[in-house]
Amino acid sequence: MPNVGPTELLILAVLFAVVLAIVIGVVVAAVKGGRAASGGRVPLATPTPQGLYETVTGLTRRGQKIQAIKELRRHTGLGLKEAKAVVDAVAMGHDLWGHPLMAGLRPARPVVPPGAGGIAVTGPDLATRVRELKAAGRAEQAVHLVRGETGMGEREAELFVEAL
């Protein structure tokens, strides 16, 4: 094994520092990019129906309709046109879960709109909503629904949807 002198050690230290700086820069850029794409926060998991309701209605009321559309599409599997129609309806004062495009995605558990005085919006059970989505040819949205309400992985949710 050859001897390593101070010059070689200095070169190795500089190379290590450069590689470390690049790795840190990539990680920081990824985190900042994730926050910018999600309104300044990094989502840790699929939101609950209540969380999705609050996110979409809150963004819409603050005039951030584009971000509301992005969040709705990301968590429901709706297309751009459908998500825009839902957000436009919410902007006009309609209930998010009352929109026909959201019918199959309506939560089984009660969702209490902010300021509703404890009045909950309820819907059919998960299996019924998944069957409705499948019958309408919206299997991908059914998978998103199952994942959001159960925490299942994608493959598990696909198997669940196929079994119904």
Image (spheres, rainbow, N blue to C red):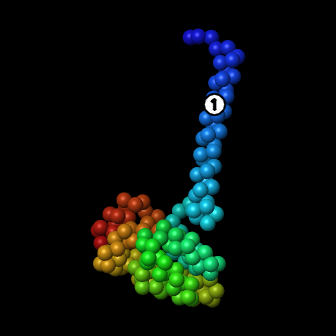
The x and y percentages for residue 93 are 56, 88
**Residue 104 percent location from the top left of the image:** 40, 79
Counting from the top left corner in percent of width and height, residue 147 is at 43, 66
Number of numbered discs: 1
Identified at 67% across, 26% down, the residue is 13
Quadrant in the picture for the N terminus: top right
In the picture, residue 146 is in which quadrant? bottom left
- The reply, left or right, for residue 92 in relation to residue 18 is left
Q: Where is residue 153 in the image (x, y as percent from the top left)?
A: 42, 60
Q: Which residue is drawn at 61% across and 50% down?
A: 29
Residue occupying image coordinates x 29% and y 67% = 162
Residue type at numbered disc 1:
Phe
Q: Which residue is drawn at 61% across and 35% down?
A: 19
Q: In this view, does 113 lie to the left or right of 82?
A: right
Disc 1 target residue: 16
Quarter of the picture holding the C terminus: bottom left
Q: Quadrant of residue 132?
A: bottom left
> Is 86 above or below relative to 76?
below
For residue 12, side relative to residue 137 (left or right): right
Confirm whether residue 130 shows in the render: yes
Tell me if residue 54 can be seen: no
Q: In this orientation, which residue lies closer to the viewer: 17 or 52?
A: 17
Q: Quadrant of residue 22?
A: top right
- Which structural element holds mark 1? helix
